[in-house]
Image: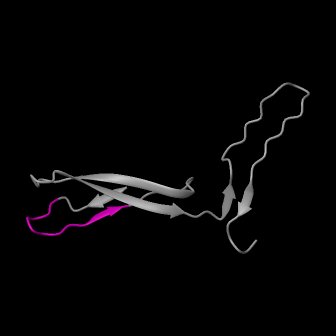
């Protein structure tokens, strides 16, 4: 989501606010936004947000799929790890 000043006078300053939703992400993420200007030297400026999303519980796989032949044992292993010091 972005909020910004629509008009900025020549030589003036403006404000751009970028917000990203981190739900479902873990680890490093990077998101970019293009800013279009009337400056003939630089008509497009790229803004990039980089972050590291820490989650309280780490799962090695988001989903577990079990497929196989009937009456046969099927196993899959995932790692569940607490990232906080407290249980």
| Horizontal and vertical percent position of residue 13 | 17, 69
Q: Nearer the viewer, residue 30 or 19?
A: 30
Q: Residue furthest top?
A: 69
Number of numbered labels in the structure image: 0
* Region rendered in magenta: 7-18
Q: Nearer the viewer, residue 20 or 59?
A: 59
Asked if residue 12 lies in the magenta stretch, the reply is yes
Q: Residue at x 89, y 34 (%)?
A: 73
Q: Nearer the viewer, residue 27 or 18?
A: 27
Q: Position of 72 compared to 27: left or right? A: right
Whether residue 69 can be seen here:
yes
| Horizontal and vertical percent position of residue 30 | 43, 55
| Horizontal and vertical percent position of residue 34 | 28, 51
Q: Position of 37 compared to 25: left or right? A: left
On-image quarter of the C terminus? bottom right
Looking at the image, is 18 positioned above or below residue 43?
A: below
Whether residue 22 can be seen here:
no
Looking at the image, is 71 positioned above or below residue 20?
A: above
Asked if residue 50 lies in the magenta stretch, the reply is no
| Horizontal and vertical percent position of residue 74 | 84, 35
What secondary structure do most residues of the magenta stretch adopt? loop
Q: Residue furthest right?
A: 71
Q: Position of 51 compared to 40: left or right? A: right
On-image quarter of the N terminus? bottom left
Q: How is the image coloured?
A: one colour
Q: Residue at x 43, y 60 (%)?
A: 50
Q: Residue at x 73, y 74 (%)?
A: 86
């Amino acid at each position: 989501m972005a909020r910004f000043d629509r008009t900025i006078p020549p030589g003036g300053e403006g404000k751009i606010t970028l917000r990203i939703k981190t739900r479902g992400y873990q680890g490093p993420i990077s998101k970019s936004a293009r800013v279009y200007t009337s400056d003939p030297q630089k008509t497009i400026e790229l803004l990039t947000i980089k972050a590291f999303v820490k989650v309280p519980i780490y799962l090695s796989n988001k989903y577990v799929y079990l497929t196989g032949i009937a009456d046969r044992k099927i196993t899959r292993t995932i790692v569940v790890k607490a990232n906080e010091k407290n249980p």
